Image (cartoon, helix red, strand yellow):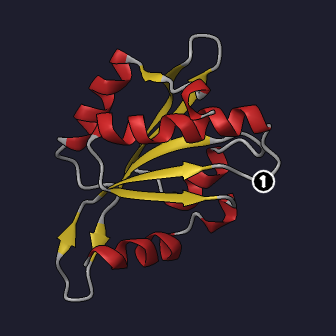
Amino acid sequence: MSSSLVVCEVDESLKEKLKKLRFRKETSNAAILMKIDMVKQHVILEEEYEDISLEDLRNELPERQPRFIVYSYKYVHADGRVSYPLCFIFSSPMGCKPEQQMMYAGSKNRLVQVAELTKVFETRNADDLTEEWLKNQLSFFN
């Protein structure tokens, strides 16, 4: 059964965008929103955002379609230190088409591997995407 699962490849231009995000020098939040091209079976760039809050990013997500997000977040720790974790968020809202959900779920690990990310989070409800939610997720890495 699992051998028939289609895992999408990551578009070459998207790999470059992810690398640039990893090494950017800006101190504001930034995001890359990705989707799957169902015909080509590739993970592709949907949109890039500079200086965007998680709440604003949430409003950019389609209501009933999964998306991948890589989010560079300015994280101020309790002791005042500042870090910029690169977070991978898989948004798979309720009501998605099952074949879409499977395609995204089957491609997630490959994308995480290609992007070399360790902070991987998942949500089934876009309303969860708040700064409080993200800080809570990141607290496990402290």
Kind of element beneath mark 1: loop
Which residue lies at the image location 27% right of the left edge and 59% below the top edge? 85
- Can you give x and y, in whole percent of width and height, for residue 37 in the image? 60, 19
**Compared to 110, does 130 lie above or below?**
below
In the picture provided, is 33 more to the left or to the right than 79? right
Within-10-Å neighbours for mark 1: few <14, some 14–19, many 20+: some
Residue shown at the point (50%, 24%) measured from the top left: 8
Q: Nearer the viewer, residue 136 or 49?
A: 136
Image quarter of the C terminus: bottom left
- Say above or below: 15 vs 134: above
Quadrant of the rendered image containing residue 49: top left
Q: Nearer the viewer, residue 48 or 3?
A: 3
Q: Amino acid at mark 1?
A: Met
Which residue sits at x=80%, y=37%?
Answer: 97
**In the displayed structure image, the side of residue 137 where residue 18 appears, left or right:** left
In this rendering, would 13 be left or right of 1? left
**Looking at the image, how many numbered discs can be counted on the residues?**
1
Rendered-image quadrant of the N terminus: top right
Q: Quadrant of residue 106?
A: top right
Up/down of 86 relative to 128, above or below: above
Q: Which residue is mark 1?
A: 94
Q: Position of residue 52 (x, y in %)?
A: 46, 52
Residue at 30% over, 69% down:
75
Seen as rendered, the residue at the extreme bottom is 79
**x, y percent for residue 74:** 30, 63
- State the residue lying farthest toward the front: 1
x, y percentage for residue 50?
A: 39, 43
